[in-house]
Image: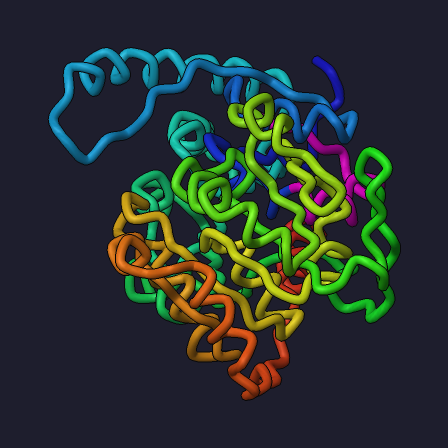
Amino acid sequence: MSKAYEIIFTGGGSGGHVMPTVTLLNDIKEKYRIGYIGGTGIEKELIGSLGLPFHTISTGKLRRYISIENLIDIFKVIKGIFDSIFVLLRKSNKKTLIFSTGGFVTVPVVLAAWLLGRRIYIHEQTTQVGLANKIASKFASKVFVSFEDSLKYFPKEKTFVSGYPLRSSLFDPSKSPITYDGMTIDEKTKPLLFITGGGNGSKLVNDLIKDNLSALQEKYYIVHQVGKAFIDEYKSFKSEKYHPVAFIGTEMTDLYKWSDIIISRAGAGTVCELIALNKKSIFIPLKIAQKNEQFHNAKEAESKIGSLVITEDELEKMNILEVLKDFESDSSPSAKTVQENGKDILIGKIAEALS
């Protein structure tokens, strides 16, 4: 049997479930023997880029509505449990810690770990709770949440507020220039408008910018994360003052710092990072997000630093140019919020578990 991993991470289905792990791994990957169990989604690409062992299992999505796919996916989940058991028997022992950050891929991993008597920690990023983590919490040793509002969804005796694991660069006041195909983001590209619909992009947000692009370019330099599925279309609009990007990686922190205005969806990671930067922004929460979680995430930023929250229904009746004009004319500064870094807390809890 090969040398067992000390920690096996799992999480996937979206970048929101994987990026917290990436943040943790950048600090601990040299200290512990680490493996990752996931599906074929974005987690495979992101974890693969770190050069860490990745084990692919069968996954089935957990839906809260009636669908024939639910029946089919039951068998995928069952196969995923056996896939996970096979990996855990070969790559772990009783002291191995299983750390889950949510997403449907984690359910078979957590169930397999519980059946084999492994320790399980889970982390919930959002103000609302995903079904996968709700299930996983019944088998977990400890549950960590980013927001106090999430405490009510989990067993009180084993749930703790850790905060969201944030990149250390957020707390560094310096910022480096960024270059995109000859366009350099620095003190000259002002005012800078950054738009993002998340790692996969958002058609609604993209269409909003496309429909107003000419007018927006008259006033702003623009960087727009459009998502891989949309990049070919938006490349045709590229200009000296408009730069579409499929996916923004490690330069995201610097881009936040350079930006004068940010328009964004309201994933938990984005919201927590902008709160940490005290960067008052415009959030357009994803309407169909589970339990309307993005709206609740955005309301956290509204209450803490005065961000603007616009629902999709409200957006239909608004002129984005007028919204930006009013947002700029609002002279009230962001409320200063000291955001504790959940990364340090979670790393400490991992160290305790493995000591």
How many labels sit on residues?
0
Is-magenta flag for residue 292? no
Image side of residue 110 versus residue 314, left or right: right
Residue 180 position in % (x across, y down):
80, 38
**Quarter of the view holding residue 226:** top right
Residue 327 position in % (x across, y down):
50, 74
Q: Which quarter of the image is occupied by the N terminus?
A: top right
> Residue drawn 66% across and 50% down?
222
Looking at the rendering, the stretch of residues picked out in magenta corresponds to: 22-38
The one nearer the camera, 288 or 9, is: 288
> Furthest-left residue in view?
66
Image side of residue 302 versus residue 242, left or right: left
> Furthest-bottom residue in view?
332
The one nearer the camera, 250 or 99, is: 250
Asked if one can make out residue 38 in the rendered structure from this viewpoint, the answer is no
In the displayed structure, 280 sits above or below 84; it is below
Residue 46 position in % (x across, y down):
66, 30
Asked if one can make out residue 299 in the rendered structure from this viewpoint, the answer is yes
> Residue drawn 66% across and 70% down?
277
The one nearer the camera, 107 or 200, is: 200
> Residue drawn 43% across and 59% down?
320
Is-magenta flag for residue 34? yes
Residue 147 position in % (x across, y down):
44, 66
**Quarter of the view holding residue 237:** top right
Image side of residue 187 versus residue 347, left or right: right
> Residue drawn 75% across and 63% down?
190
Image side of residue 240 versus residue 126, left or right: right
In the displayed structure, 15 sits above or below 258; it is above
The colouring scheme, among rainbow, by chain, secondary structure or one colour, is rainbow
